[in-house]
Image (tube, helix red, strand yellow):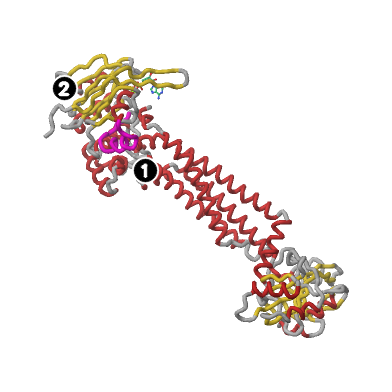
Amino acid sequence: MQVAHELAVSCRGVTKTYVSGSTRTEALRGIDLDVLSSELLMLVGPSGCGKTTLISVIAGILDQDAGTSIVFGRDFKSMSQRQKTAWRGAHVGFVFQAFNLLPALNARENVAVPLLILGTPRREALERAQAVLADVGLSDRGGSLPAELSGGQQQRVAIARALVHSPRLIVCDEPTSSLDAETGKTVIELLKETAVAPNRALVIVTHDSRIFSYADRVARMDDGRITRIETQRTAP
Amino acid sequence: MNFIALKMLMGDRAKYIGIIIGLTFASLLITQQASVFVGLMTRTFGAISDLGQADVWVMDPKVQFVDDVKPLSDTRLFLVRGVEGVQWAVPLYKGLLKARLENGNFQTCIVFGIDDATLMGGPPQMFEGKLEDLRRSEAVIVDLNGARTKLARPPLEPGGASRPLEIGDSLELNDHRAVVVGLCGVTRTFQSQPTIYTTYSRATQFAPRERRLLSFILVKAKAGEDPAALCRRIHGQTGLLAQTSTEFQWTTVKYFMKYTGIPINFGIAVLLGFLVGTVIAGQTFYNFTLDNIRQFGALKAMGASNATLLRMILLQALLSGGIGYGLGVGLASLFGRVVRGTELAFRMMPQILMISGAAVLFICMLSAVLSIRKVMKLEPAIVFKS
Ligand SMILES: Nc1ncnc2c1ncn2[C@@H]1O[C@H](COP(=O)(O)OP(=O)(O)O)[C@@H](O)[C@H]1O
Ligand SMILES: [Mg+2]
């Protein structure tokens, strides 16, 4: 039995300072944030306020300097890099602003990548990838290379890739910023439709205020801190 | 993940071709130069390998290689014949004599004088005439290549083609008349002078008068006799240097390696091929990895372990290496075919293929190691950088 509002992510006092040469940038100055296990949380705020840094910590691809980040009960601090990598492969889906599809692979193969990383046999992985491509409305573009797809289509392939292995956490960094307003809207609707599920947390970083309304909650950030968390009354 | 690695590699067409070209170039140059080198070295002992009937060569202890003749006195032959385990021992004259051609020019020839009685030590191959014809007076056998080129007679009319020396033609060897009774095939020698065979006694008449004229004693071991042991026994009883055919070939090769610049020249060419190949292939491969670093980062973020990425990069390097090696060795053998039968020496031994294979593998691993280091240290967080 899953409890509806189990905690997916729990950050306490998370700090991160980038040091490059003599300049130090305090990107996170003590973050306290909870993400519920079935919600869509948007992380918003001005450029440079630390949003990307925060979801990198949450997704386990960046180590914080201090504080704890517990994701589905696992404390990353106590895990080796190898364990974290394996954990990410099994439980995290990524959507990037720059899509980050492999240009030499066609859409279906790109979607299959997380399954292949997990060791799924190639044929089975490709079959499941094709099915998920259909879910994002691209059943007929499985054989196309990323270069042959529009930006919106590429991001849909990326969403399919984030979904294909049924991860419990999906992180999206500015998924609509590379797209025009209309395409961005359809992409976010698609995310809302396909990615939100019981027992799956979705964290979307954005500064596109037009899509805030799709969130269950909006966490506002400024200068490395969470300044306010709003619960949306009416999600469309 | 393997097919992803391969698609990544081939997807970057320009770099893929660059890597392959670098590796092809390296393996071609290494294989081709080494084969020419081995070909040349094989020629240095052509006189030994052509004389397949002899197991052991007996010579003056100071002889350094096959062309370094230090004559023995004829009586030594009987001493060697007396050694236990010797089936037969025959004299061999080997010397350089001047042949006077019809047009008045002189041509230095390698002259072999073989045992009058048994005719042991004759040419490996007869094209025209018979070895026994050497028993006729003034008879010599000339190598076909020499007969067609350096010993050829002048054209009948000016501007015409020169005429190869034929059976029945005569020439003058050191002011002695000699008649061609046969044409033979020999391994092209290092100095590529024409080779002439005659009997031992006639050769010593042709040769300038010297106290000693016996160049080598050729020995056949009795059946079941170990040639190396026989060599030791001959040395012990006669004080002469005795070497098996193979030993003497190596002695000769080593002499050329040590006292000529040939190995260094080829060594430099091989090294150059290796270095240029390494630079082109290594550099391009590293650039390929750098260009795709975001892709590797994305794979890492999505849970690909360092071990997986390492395997992918190794596979990419090995595939490129395999193709480059195949093309390079293929081109080198093509070169070998094209130059077959020309003046150029070319001998592609299995060992050469192994060495160039190892060199290509080394280049691939070196390129891969640089790339692997980069990818291992890669922070997956770069994937979020736009
Ligand atoms: N790898 C890095 N090295 C140094 N400074 C960095 C690095 N990544 C981000 N920063 C800095 O940290 C701050 C927060 O960055 P980021 O988390 O990317 O913000 P956001 O995603 O909200 O735009 C910025 O000032 C940025 O310049
Ligand atoms: Mg950002």
Tell me the chief SS of the magenta region.
helix
The disc labelled 1 sits on which kind of residue? Thr
The residue labelled by disc 2 is A235
Where is residue A191 drawn, in percent x and y? 22, 30
Q: Secondary structure at mark 2?
A: loop
Residue sitting nearer the eye, A144 or B136? B136
A47 is within the stretch colored magenta: no
Residue sitting nearer the eye, B299 or B342? B299
> Residue B32 occupies which quadrant of the picture?
bottom right
- Farthest left residue? A1
Task: Identify the chain of the residue marked 2, using the numbered disc in the image.
Answer: A
Where is residue B258 drawn, in percent x and y? 71, 56
Q: Which residues are magenta?
A: A78-96
Quadrant where the C terminus of chain B lies?
top left
Residue at the spot x=79%, y=66% of the render? B159
Q: Which mark is residue B308?
A: 1
